[in-house]
Image: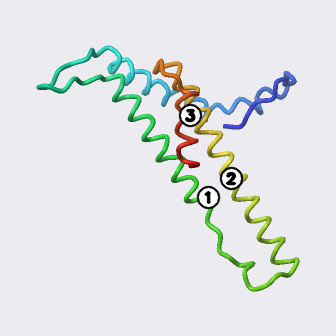
Amino acid sequence: MAQLPTRIEVDQTKNYSQLDERFELAKMTHQVSIFTEGILAMEKTLLGVIQVDPRGILEDGLRKELVRQISLAMHVSLKFDGSGKKGYDGASAMATHQAANKAFLGLAGRVSGFSRAIEYVQDYVDLAGLKMWQEELSRIMR
């Protein structure tokens, strides 16, 4: 979804409504909230000698999926064909720079979307989403 400016003219509201995208986001958020409601309603349970914490399992699953999605986005977005390796000339260097810039901008958009998704979900899951985001992103970067 496109970011909304802080001020919008009344006649421009329809251009920024993004009804289909917002409906899809609301539908997915509702599914997450129903799933989470069931998980959080469960209490710690013993399976033999192992104590199962549903809340911990949910957080671990979110962390794993977050890492998987960010790593996949980086893997797919940051592939370069090496077309500027034959020697230094201004045209190939500029093309390489533009390709890298385009790749990083695309990756920035995807990662920003993941960050906003964690923000949306944290309200329903009642977990520290920003902390989770920072820990997992720093772990990926290391």
Find residue 112 and name its label: none
Three-letter code, disc 3: Trp
| Whole-number angstrom distance, CA of label 2 to CA of label 1 | 7 Å
Task: Give 22 or 86, whichever is nearer the viewer.
Answer: 86
Label tally = 3
Q: Quadrant of residue 1?
A: top right
Three-letter code, disc 2: Gly
| SS for dot 1 | helix
In terms of sequence position, does the residue under pointer 3 or pointer 2 come before the other? 2
Q: Quadrant of residue 51?
A: top left
> Which dot, 3 or 1, sits closer to the camera?
3
Q: Which residue is mark 3?
A: 133
Q: Which residue is mark 2?
A: 106
Give how far across and how far down residue 103 sits, in percent: 69, 59
Residue at image x 33%, y 21%?
39
Q: Which residue is mark 1?
A: 77
Q: Is residue 67 left or right of residue 35?
A: right
> Which dot, 3 or 2, sits closer to the camera?
3
Q: Residue furthest left?
A: 48
Residue at image x 84%, y 71%?
94
